[in-house]
C-alpha cells in the first residue's frame, strides 16, 4: 500500500487553470500561458480572465467556478491584492496552488498582513500553496511548464528544487546547453507554505526521479529539511549547491552558518558542490556513470598538459591516482609507440590514432587497481574528436567501471558529445571539471557505504542522573547566572558519566590544603570567575599551596568575599602517554547544537563538526576530521566521551554552550581537564519532542520492561547497532512467518533492507523491539514499527513476532505501545496491509479496533485502519 503523494496534483496535474492568463505582451499571465501552450500540456488547460472571452485564441473563463469541475493545479498570475480572495474562493475548486505573483510592494507591516491573509485563505480553502513569488513548476513527461522562464526543461530523470527563480532559470539554461534533462523542476519562492522538506518527500517517492539537485539559500525548518534529505539520500543521489557561504556566526567563536550547514549535510549522505559548473558536473556524472568501487582514477590523454592539470586537480580533491599493475604496464607497451613509457597519467601522445587511444583506455580499465578512467582528448590531425569519441564509447559500452571524458575544444561539436553519450560517457570539456565530477561520484559512493555499514553491537551507556542535572540548573538560575560554576560543572558532567578533573571550592588556606589532600597533589589554585587572573599551577605540597593562597588574597583582596571570586582547588591530571584535544558544543540558530572536536591548539573555526546525536561511527568520523583517514585504534575512551557529550546535548535543551578546552586521553581513559558550561533558563527543562535538535535522537524514554508469562522482556527502540540481532531475528523466522511479514519469499535481509530497518529516523518512524536474554546473549523476539506516510497524517505499521512467542500476547503488547506512541506523535490514522490468509494478524488487528477492507488493487490483501484521532 503506497498512498498517492498529496503533492501529486502540483507536480503531475491532470488539469491546470492559469488564473490571470493574459494576451498583454510582457505580462506574467501571458508568459506562463504561452509556456503551457508551447509545451502542449497533456491535460485539461483553462485560462481564467474575467475581462476577456478568449486569451491567445483559446476560450477564457470568468472564474474557477465557471469551469464546472475542480482542477488539480491553479497557477495564479493575478495582481497580489487579489490573491487571498482568489484562493479563498477556490475552496473545492482547486487542489493545489502555484503562486507566481509576488507580494505587494509595500511596507513591512503590510507585507506581513498580506502573508497572514494568504495563509488564512489557504487554510479555509484547504489547499497547499507553492510560493508566493515562485518561479513555478515543470513536469517534462506531461508537457507541464507552469513557469515564467524563457525555456522549458529537457526530459530527464533528475528533479531540480531551487529556492530562487532566477537561479532556477539560469540552471535550466546551463543544463540545456550540456544536454541535462529533468523529470521535475520547482522553485519555492518566498515559501509561505510548501517548503524544502515536502518537495524532497515528493522527489523521494517519485518513480520518474533518479537523482535530486538542490539550490539552497536559507533553511526555515531544519528538522523537516534534514529528515526528508536523509530519507531521500538513502535511495537517490542528492546534490546540494548553497549560496551565502561567508555569513558570519551569530555568536563569537561559534561555527559559521556555512560550517553548520556542512555539518548537517554530513549527516544526510549528500554531495555538496560550490558552483554552477560543479553542480552540473555532479549531476551529469550521477546520471551517466555507475558507482566506482573506490576513488582510484587513471588518466589517459593525448596531451601532456591536460593530463598534468587533471592530476593536480585530483590531488586537490582527494582523488587517488591509481598505481597501474605490472601486467597493465606491459600490455600498454604492446599497443603504444616505443617512445611512450606508460604511467598515470598515461600520455599516448598526439600521434595516437583513435583506435590506439581506445586500446589504451581498454587496457587501463582492465587493471584491478583502477576504479575509473578519465579520457582527455585534444583534437589533432591524427585523432579527430568525433572518431576518437566513437572508439572510446565502444570500449566504455562494455565496461563495468565508470569512464569520464573531457574533449577539449569540442564545446561547439555536438557530434563528439553525442558519440560519447552513446557509450554512456559524460563529456566535461575541461580536465578540472571531469576530476571534480569523479570526486563527487566517489563521495556519493562513500556516503552510501556508510549508510549500509553494519555497526557492531555496543555496550550501552549507563542512564544519566537527570535529577542531579536538574538540581544544577536550579542552583545556577537561582543565583541569576547563565555561566555554570566549576563545582556545578563537575556535578553536571558527572551526572552523565563524564570524567572531569576533581575540583573543590574553598574559602581559606586551611580548606585549600585539606582539599588538596583529598584530591591528591599536584593541584592548581585559582578563581572560578572566567575573568580572574591565571591560576597558580603545579602546586605539589601544603607550603606551596599556602603561599599561592596568600598571593591570590593579596592580589584581589575583597574580591574573595564575592560569589564570582570563589577559590577553586583543581587536581592536575597527567595521564600516561596522553594526547590532548578540545571538545565543544555550540548553538546554531538553524540546526541547533553542534559538537566540535580538534587539537589542543585548534581555533574554533578549524574544529571538526558533527550534528548530534552521535553514534560510534560518527564519533570516529568527527575525530578523524571528516576525512577518510583512519584514526588511531586506541581512541575508545575518547569515542565514549564524545558519546556522553552527545547524550548530554540530547537530554538537556537548556545547556546551550559547552567548552572542554583541555581533554586528556590515552588508550584506557579520557578526562576533561578544563570545562566551561553556559545555560539558558528560558529553554525547556526536558526535551519535549527533542525540538531543540535538527535530528531526533534515540528516544531513551521509551525503554521499558514487559513481563509475559513470568518472563521479563526488554522493550526499546531499535538502534543501528542492533543490525546483527535484526538479521538473526528475520533469519530465524519460519518461511511462513517471513512470507506473511514481507509478502514475498525471502530467506534473509539484503544489506539495503537491514540498513533501512535499523537506521531509523525517529522523527518519521519508530521500531520497538522486544529482547530476551542477558547482555552478550540477547536476541530480538518481536518487532513493531510504523513509518510515516507522505501526508505526515498517517503511518503504516507492521508487527512480527518470533515463532516461539506466537500466542503469548507479545504482538498485542507491542502494538498497544506502538499505538500509544503514534497518538503522541500526532498521527490521525495507523494503517497496514495484511495478507488475506493471515488470520492471526487479522484477529489481532480486529481486537485492537482496526477496521478491515479488501485492497481494491490486490484482492489477496486486506487494508486495516485504526483512527487515532479526528482531524481538526
Image (tube, grey):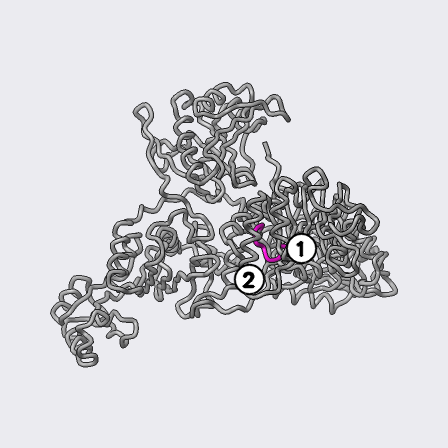
**In the figure, 712 relative to 474: above or below?**
above
Marks 1, 2: nearer the viewer: 2
Task: Specify few, some or many for label 2: CA neighbours under 10 Å numbering under 14, 14-19, or 20 or more.
Answer: few
Q: Main secondary structure of the magenta part?
A: loop
**In the figure, 469 relative to 106: above or below?**
above
Answer left or right for 739 relative to 28: left
Answer left or right for 128 relative to 725: right
Answer left or right for 271 relative to 672: right
Question: What residue lies at 53% left-to-right and 23% top-to-bottom?
Answer: 852
Question: What residue lies at 80% left-to-right and 63% top-to-bottom?
Answer: 411
- Residue 246 position in % (x across, y down): 55, 69
Please identify the residue farthest to the front as the structure is shown. 51
Q: What stretch is highlighted in magenta?
A: 187-194
- Residue 696 position in % (x across, y down): 44, 48
Q: Describe the element under mark 1 as helix, strand or loop.
A: loop
**In the figure, 503 relative to 709: above or below?**
below
Please identify the residue farthest to the left as the structure is shown. 510
Question: What residue lies at 57% left-to-right and 28% top-to-bottom?
Answer: 746
Residue 657 figure quarter: bottom left
- Residue 40 position in % (x across, y down): 80, 46
Q: Which of 121 and 724 is in front in this view?
A: 121
Which mark, residue 87? none
- Residue 344 position in % (x across, y down): 69, 61
Residue 153 in sight here: no
Which mark, residue 110? 2
Residue carrying label 1: 100
Q: Distance between the residues labelled 1 and 2?
A: 19 Å
Q: Which of 80 and 283 is in front in this view?
A: 80
Which image quadrant: the N terminus?
top right
The answer to which of marks 1 and 2 sits earlier in the sequence is: 1
Q: Describe the element under mark 2 as helix, strand or loop.
A: helix
Amino acid at each position: 500500500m503506497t498512498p498517492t503523494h498529496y503533492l501529486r496534483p502540483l507536480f503531475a496535474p491532470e488539469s491546470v487553470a492559469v488564473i490571470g492568463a493574459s494576451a498583454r505582451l510582457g505580462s506574467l499571465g501571458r508568459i506562463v500561458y504561452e509556456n503551457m501552450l508551447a509545451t502542449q500540456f497533456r491535460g485539461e488547460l483553462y485560462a481564467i480572465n474575467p475581462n476577456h472571452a478568449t486569451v491567445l485564441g483559446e476560450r477564457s473563463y470568468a472564474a474557477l467556478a465557471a469551469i464546472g469541475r475542480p482542477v488539480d493545479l491553479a497557477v495564479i498570475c493575478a495582481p497580489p491584492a487579489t490573491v487571498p480572495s482568489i484562493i479563498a474562493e477556490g475552496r473545492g475548486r482547486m487542489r493545489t496552488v502555484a503562486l507566481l505573483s509576488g507580494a505587494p510592494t509595500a511596507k513591512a507591516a503590510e507585507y506581513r498582513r498580506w502573508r497572514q491573509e494568504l495563509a488564512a485563505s489557504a487554510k479555509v480553502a484547504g489547499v497547499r500553496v507553492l510560493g508566493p513569488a515562485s518561479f513555478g513548476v515543470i513536469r517534462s513527461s506531461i508537457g507541464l511548464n507552469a513557469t515564467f522562464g524563457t525555456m522549458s526543461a529537457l526530459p530527464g530523470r533528475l528533479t531540480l528544487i531551487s529556492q530562487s527563480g532566477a537561479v532556477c532559470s539560469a540552471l535550466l539554461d546551463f543544463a540545456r546547453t550540456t544536454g541535462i534533462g529533468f523529470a521535475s523542476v520547482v522553485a519555492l519562492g518566498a515559501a509561505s507554505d510548501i517548503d524544502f522538506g515536502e518537495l524532497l518527500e515528493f522527489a523521494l517517492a517519485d518513480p520518474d526521479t533518479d537523482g535530486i539537485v538542490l539550490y539552497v539559500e536559507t533553511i526555515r525548518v531544519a528538522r523537516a529539511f534534514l529528515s526528508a534529505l536523509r530519507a531521500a539520500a538513502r535511495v537517490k543521489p542528492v546534490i546540494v549547491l548553497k549560496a551565502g557561504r561567508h555569513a558570519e556566526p551569530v555568536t563569537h567563536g561559534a561555527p559559521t552558518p556555512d560550517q553548520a550547514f556542512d555539518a548537517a549535510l554530513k549527516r544526510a549522505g549528500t554531495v555538496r558542490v560550490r558552483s554552477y559548473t560543479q553542480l552540473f558536473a555532479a549531476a551529469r556524472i550521477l546520471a551517466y556513470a555507475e558507482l566506482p568501487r573506490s576513488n582510484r582514477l587513471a588518466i589517459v590523454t593525448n596531451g601532456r598538459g591536460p593530463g598534468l592539470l587533471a592530476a593536480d586537480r585530483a590531488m586537490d580533491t582527494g582523488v587517488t591516482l591509481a598505481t597501474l599493475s605490472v601486467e597493465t604496464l606491459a600490455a600498454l607497451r604492446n599497443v603504444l609507440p616505443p617512445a611512450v613509457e606508460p604511467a598515470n597519467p598515461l600520455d599516448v601522445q598526439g600521434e595516437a590514432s583513435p583506435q590506439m587511444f581506445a586500446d589504451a583506455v581498454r587496457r587501463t580499465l582492465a587493471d584491478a587497481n583502477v576504479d575509473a578512467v578519465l579520457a582527455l582528448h585534444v583534437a589533432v590531425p591524427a585523432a579527430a574528436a568525433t572518431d576518437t569519441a566513437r572508439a572510446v564509447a565502444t570500449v566504455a559500452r562494455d565496461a563495468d567501471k565508470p569512464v569520464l571524458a573531457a574533449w577539449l575544444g569540442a564545446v561547439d561539436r555536438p557530434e563528439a558529445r553525442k558519440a560519447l553519450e552513446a557509450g554512456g560517457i559524460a563529456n566535461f570539456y575541461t580536465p578540472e571539471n571531469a576530476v571534480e565530477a569523479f570526486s563527487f561520484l566517489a563521495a556519493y559512493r562513500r556516503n552510501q557505504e556508510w549508510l549500509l555499514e553494519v555497526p557492531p553491537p555496543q555496550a550501552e551507556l549507563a542512564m544519566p542522573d537527570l535529577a542531579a542535572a536538574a538540581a544544577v540548573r536550579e542552583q545556577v538560575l537561582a543565583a541569576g547566572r547563565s555561566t555554570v560554576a566549576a563545582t556545578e560543572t563537575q556535578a553536571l558532567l558527572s551526572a552523565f558519566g563524564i570524567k572531569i578533573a576533581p575540583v573543590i571550592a574553598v574559602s581559606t588556606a586551611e580548606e585549600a590544603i585539606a582539599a588538596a589532600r583529598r584530591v591528591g597533589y599536584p593541584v592548581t589554585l585559582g578563581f572560578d570567575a572566567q575573568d580572574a587572573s591565571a591560576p597558580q599551577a603545579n602546586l605539589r605540597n601544603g607550603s606551596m599551596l599556602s603561599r599561592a593562597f596568600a598571593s591570590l588574597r593579596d592580589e584581589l583582596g575583597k574580591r574573595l568575599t564575592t560569589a564570582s571570586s570563589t577559590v577553586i582547588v583543581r587536581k592536575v591530571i597527567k595521564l600516561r602517554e596522553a594526547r590532548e584535544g578540545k571538545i565543544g558544543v555550540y548553538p546554531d540558530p538553524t540546526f541547533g547544537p553542534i559538537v566540535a572536536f580538534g587539537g589542543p591548539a585548534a581555533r574554533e573555526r578549524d574544529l571538526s563538526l558533527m550534528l548530534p546525536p552521535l553514534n560510534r561511527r560518527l564519533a570516529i568520523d568527527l575525530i578523524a576530521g571528516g576525512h577518510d583517514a583512519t584514526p588511531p585504534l586506541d581512541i575508545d575512551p575518547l569515542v565514549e566521551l564524545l558519546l556522553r557529550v552527545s547524550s548530554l546535548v540530547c537530554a538537556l535543551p537548556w545547556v546551550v554552550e559547552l567548552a572542554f578546552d583541555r581533554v586528556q586521553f590515552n588508550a584506557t581513559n579520557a578526562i576533561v581537564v578544563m570545562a566551561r558550561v553556559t545555560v539558558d533558563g528560558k529553554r525547556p527543562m526536558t526535551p519535549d519532542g527533542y525540538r531543540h535538535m535538527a535530528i531526533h535522537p534515540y528516544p531513551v524514554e521509551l525503554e521499558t520492561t514487559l513481563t509475559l508469562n513470568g518472563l521479563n522482556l526488554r522493550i526499546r527502540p531499535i538502534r543501528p547497532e542492533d543490525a546483527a540481532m535484526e538479521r538473526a531475528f528475520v533469519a530465524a523466522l519460519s518461511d511462513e512467518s517471513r512470507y506473511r511479514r514481507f509478502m514475498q519469499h525471502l530467506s534473509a535481509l539484503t544489506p539495503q533492507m537491514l540498513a533501512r530497518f535499523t537506521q531509523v529516523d525517529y522523527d518519521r518512524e519508530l521500531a520497538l523491539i522486544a529482547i530476551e536474554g542477558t547482555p552478550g546473549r540477547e536476541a530480538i523476539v518481536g518487532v513493531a514499527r510504523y513509518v510515516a506516510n507522505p501526508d505526515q497524517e498517517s503511518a503504516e505499521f507492521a508487527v512480527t513476532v518470533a515463532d516461539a512467542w506466537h500466542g503469548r500476547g507479545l504482538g498485542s503488547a507491542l502494538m498497544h505501545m506502538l499505538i500509544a506512541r503514534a497518538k503522541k506523535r500526532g498521527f490521525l490514522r495507523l494503517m497496514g496491509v495484511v495478507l488475506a490468509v493471515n488470520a492471526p494478524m487479522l484477529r489481532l488487528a480486529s481486537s485492537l479496533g482496526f477496521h478491515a477492507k479488501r485492497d481494491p488493487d490486490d484482492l489477496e490483501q486486506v487494508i486495516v485502519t485504526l483512527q487515532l484521532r479526528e482531524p481538526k
